[in-house]
């Protein structure tokens, strides 16, 4: 906020808003820009997709991984996340609370945007919602530094380097908490 100058009894007086008021106004503006739309509160969103990997180490480590991400948006707009990954006989489940999803997921209007980092490169998960919060669509796009290969941890825990392709995105939404009330 800019200082304001007023004339009182012919003298120029400069008024500055208190720092705490400036910070509070900034936080309110920032939090409302990333707040969950009211129609999405207390909803569970399930996103499924496939990741096809071509490993530079050869065909032994190439394959397709099935991913199901379950997100619960609480009444307070906090996001809880579960990622279920399956690749062949190997499975992995990762649960994250709001303390770990806050930097990964944010709302931008009627969209939820998530960044899914790899050791090298990342994927962006975008979920579009209708205004009533009854339906959704999802897309996953990969990104990496120019000329660099992706580097990721496979479901079995091994590190791999190569290319990734995302496909088969689907999305559903339902009332309530998938993780229990």
Image (spheres, rainbow, N blue to C red):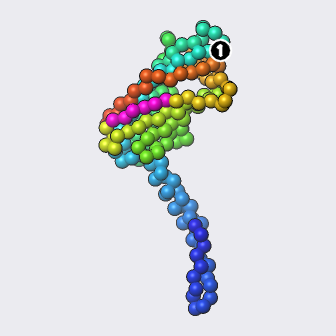
Q: Quadrant of residue 131?
A: top left
In this view, which residue lies farthest toward the right? 147
Q: Is residue 67 above or below residue 26?
A: above
Residue at x 57% of width, y 21% of height: 164
Q: Quadrant of the N terminus?
A: bottom right
How many numbered discs? Answer: 1
Q: 123 left or right of 139? A: right
In this view, which residue lies farthest toward the bottom? 9
Q: 28 left or right of 145? A: left
Q: Is residue 154 magenta?
A: no
What is the x, y in percent for residue 104?
53, 38
In this view, which residue lies farthest toward the front? 146
Q: 174 left or right of 27? A: left
Residue at x 65% of width, y 14% of height: 56
Residue at x 56% of width, y 61% of height: 23
Neighbours of disc 1 within 10 Å: few (<14), some (14-19), many (20+): some
Q: Quadrant of the C terminus?
A: top left
Camera sees residue 178: no
Bounds of the magenta span? 135-140
What is the x, y in percent for residue 119?
64, 27
What is the x, y in percent for residue 5?
59, 79
Residue at x 49% of width, y 57% of height: 28
What is the x, y in percent for residue 75?
38, 45
Q: To which residue does mark 1 refer?
A: 56
The front one of 181 and 127 is: 127
């Amino acid at each position: 906020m800019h200082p304001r100058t007023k004339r009182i009894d012919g003298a120029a007086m400069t008024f500055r808003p208190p720092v705490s008021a400036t910070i509070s106004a900034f936080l309110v503006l920032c939090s409302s820009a990333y707040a969950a739309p009211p129609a999405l509160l207390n909803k569970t969103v399930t996103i499924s997709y496939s990741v096809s990997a071509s490993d530079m180490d050869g065909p032994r480590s190439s394959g397709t991984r099935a991913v199901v991400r379950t997100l619960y948006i609480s009444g307070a707009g906090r996001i809880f996340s579960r990622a279920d990954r399956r690749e062949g006989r190997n499975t992995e489940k990762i649960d994250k609370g709001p303390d770990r999803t806050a930097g990964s997921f944010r709302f931008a209007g009627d969209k939820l945007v998530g960044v899914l980092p790899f050791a090298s490169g990342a994927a962006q998960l975008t979920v579009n919602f209708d205004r009533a919060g009854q339906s959704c669509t999802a897309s996953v796009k990969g990104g990496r530094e120019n000329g660099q290969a992706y580097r990721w941890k496979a479901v079995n825990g091994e590190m791999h380097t190569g290319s990734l392709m995302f496909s088969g995105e689907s999305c559903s939404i339902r009332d309530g908490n998938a993780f229990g009330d």
